[in-house]
Image (cartoon, grey):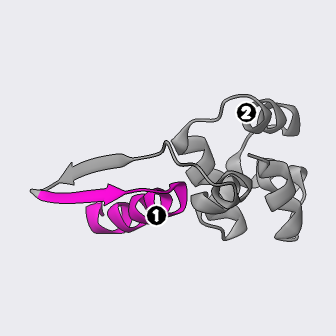
Amino acid sequence: MDIAKIIKRKGFTQKQVSDALGINRVNLNNMINGNPTYRTMRQVADVIGANVSEFFEDEVKRPNEDFASYVRYKGIHYTADTLEEFFKQVDELRIIAK
């Protein structure tokens, strides 16, 4: 996962993103280069106009035969066999949950 690469690709600097989030650049750098939470990824994605799934594009491109997910939300069952499917579902569920 290379969030910094996606920030740059979207035409932003880490300084611009950190300013939009109300934190300093060093803190943002530590957050995105460590083990960022989904909340952090969502906040950065919102600032740069991206989907969280874009942060995982390198992992998605690699075949991952051992991945499977199962989510039940409001009685509806969602399954995914790839990371790409999973992150699309997360984005869809986020919209539904609003």
Q: Amino acid at mark 2?
A: Met
Is 71 situated above or below 30? below
Which is in the foreground here, disc 2 or disc 1? 1
| Picture quadrant where residue 37 is located | top right
Q: Position of residue 10 (x, y in %)?
A: 82, 70
Mark 2–mark 1 Cα distance, whole angstroms, equals 25 Å
Q: Residues within 10 Å of mark 2 (few under 14, many from 20)?
A: some
| Picture quadrant where residue 35 is located | top right
Q: Amino acid at mark 1?
A: Glu
Q: Residue at x 19, y 51 (%)?
A: 72
Q: What's drawn in magenta, residue-wise? A: 76-98
Residue 55 is a magenta residue: no
| Residue located beneath label 1 in the image | 85
Q: Position of residue 49 (x, y in %)?
A: 67, 71
Q: Position of residue 90 (x, y in %)?
A: 41, 58
The number of callouts visible is: 2
Q: Position of residue 61 (x, y in %)?
A: 69, 61
| Residue located beneath label 2 in the image | 31
Q: Nearer the viewer, residue 13 or 87?
A: 87
Q: Residue furthest front?
A: 65
Q: Residue at x 87, y 51 (%)?
A: 14
